Structures are given as structure tokens and as C-alpha cells.
Image (cartoon, helix red, strand yellow):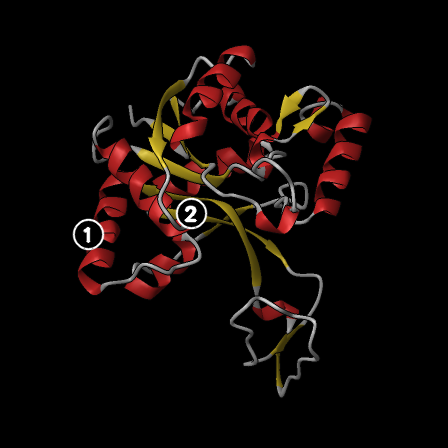
Amino acid sequence: MTRSVALILAGGVGNRMHMAIPKQFTEVDGLSVLQYTMMAFQRHRLIDAVYVVAAPKWHMAVREQAAMAGISKLNGVATSGATSMGSLMSGIAYIAENENDETVVLVHDAVRPLLPQETISSNIAVCLSRGNAITAIESQESFMLTEQRHEDGDTSHTRSSNDFLLREAVLRAQTPHTFRLHELKAMRREADERGIDDAQSLFVLACRLGHTPLYAAQGSTLNFKLTVPTDIDVFRAIVHEFGPLGREDR
């Protein structure tokens, strides 16, 4: 039977949070964000193993937190890279040493802690039937297209748009992004050969490398990314109201 494993990317530093520690290690009601994320995969009956990518100084913390949360499926901690793509490449290489080429790998952001069980199921099913899966949800808004960018990340200046995308024409990509291990290894090799080291996500990398078409798996509004401090507040409110697994507790 085909194995399915999770690759959780927890190497970020969380600059936009302005916090003393990375946001994935921030505690909410006695558990770190990473623990909530690991618990989602631990619960799912089709997930055989969990791998985490983290900075070396956090490796011990990952293992300790996994033990405290009863994460028996943790199978290893890989060392993060200097960028999110570097961490992804490191994680793929680590899994390649432990899994066979047909293994289904769900690559997920550590800071999406309210991952529904049905989203995991959808990713595995779509990948097995179509070859890959990108978690996505329909947009509730249309999009303004702008070419103005700020090298320093400053978005305080007024931005303008001359074009748009209707909401019916787009899906909002989330994670997991799910592929067979052999395809992840191929993308890793091709990215290295072409000198691509700045892809924002596995989804973007697959598009740039031409590993398409990509197929949508069922996403959820609960599966939001903790990016700014107010996101932590929203996450805390959901946990307080519905418990550590969000609305799935009800």
C-alpha cells in the first residue's frame, strides 16, 4: 500500500510577527503552533509518518514538543535552509533518504495549524488519482493586478492597478501541496540545474518548472496562515471557542 507522509516546513523566522521566537513555536493555550499542526497529521489514519524542517537550534524543541503532544508519527527533523525554498529542498532530500519514490508527500506550512482532516484526505485522494494536489479554495473577491513592487517590503505607498481578475477565474492556494516523492526529487534536481532558488512555494516552483497541470484539493477557510500578530489572535479565539482542533471538535 502506498505510504503518505507529511513534510512540515517550520524553518521560518517570522519577521512580520515582531516576536522573540519564531511564530511556529509560539504557545497558544499551552501548546505551540507547531504542536497543533503536527496533531492534525497525527490524527489522520492515512498519514504514516511526519517529518519537520527546522533550524538546528530548534531540533531538540521539535522532538520534545512532539513527545509531549503524543506525536508518535514523527520520523525525523531536517535542517532548514536560508530561504523557504532552501528549507523545502532540504526536506525533500531528507525524505528521499527515508521513503520510496512512490510515497505521497504532503508539504505543509507549520503556521497553518487548523488543517482539517478532510483537507488531508482530499490531498491524498486527488494526488493518487490525478498525480498531484494543491489545496485551494474559491475566492470571495476579485483581484486588482499591480506591477508595482517594493524591494524593501514596504507596502505603505499607494499602489495602482490597470487590470483585474474576476473571482470566478482564480482559486486561492493554501497548503498542503502534494506530490509523489519521485516528482519532488525531479523538481529539486531541475531547480538546481536551472538556478531557481527563489520560488515562494512548491506550488509556484511546480508552475515555473512546467510540472503541470496542477489539480485542486479541498481547502478550508480555517486553514489560514499565521502571518501577522492579529492572525495569532484569531487562532487563539478559535481554540478558546472550539478546542485545539477547531470546529472539528464539535
Residue 118 rendering spot, x and y as whole percentages: 57, 34
* 9 displayed left or right of 222: left
Sequence-wise, the earlier of marks 1 and 2 is 2
Q: Give the SS element for disc 1.
A: helix
Q: Are marks 1 and 2 in contact (CB under 8 Å)?
A: no
Can you tell which quarter of the image residue 208 is in? bottom left
Mark 1, residues whose alpha carbon is within 10 Å: few (<14), some, or many (≥20)? Answer: few
Q: Residue at x 47, y 40 (%)?
A: 108
Give the foreground label among 1 and 2: 1
Residue 221 rendering spot, x and y as whole percentages: 67, 46
Q: Which mark is residue 156?
A: none
Q: Which residue in the protein does label 1 denote? A: 189
Rendered position, 100 above or below 65:
below
Q: Taking the image as drawn, is residue 152 in sight?
A: yes
Can you tell which quarter of the image residue 233 is in? top right
In terms of depth relative to the viewer, which is nearer, 89 or 106?
89
Mark 2, residues whose alpha carbon is within 10 Å: few (<14), some, or many (≥20)? Answer: many
Rendered position, 69 above or below 190:
above
Q: Which residue in the protein does label 2 denote? A: 133
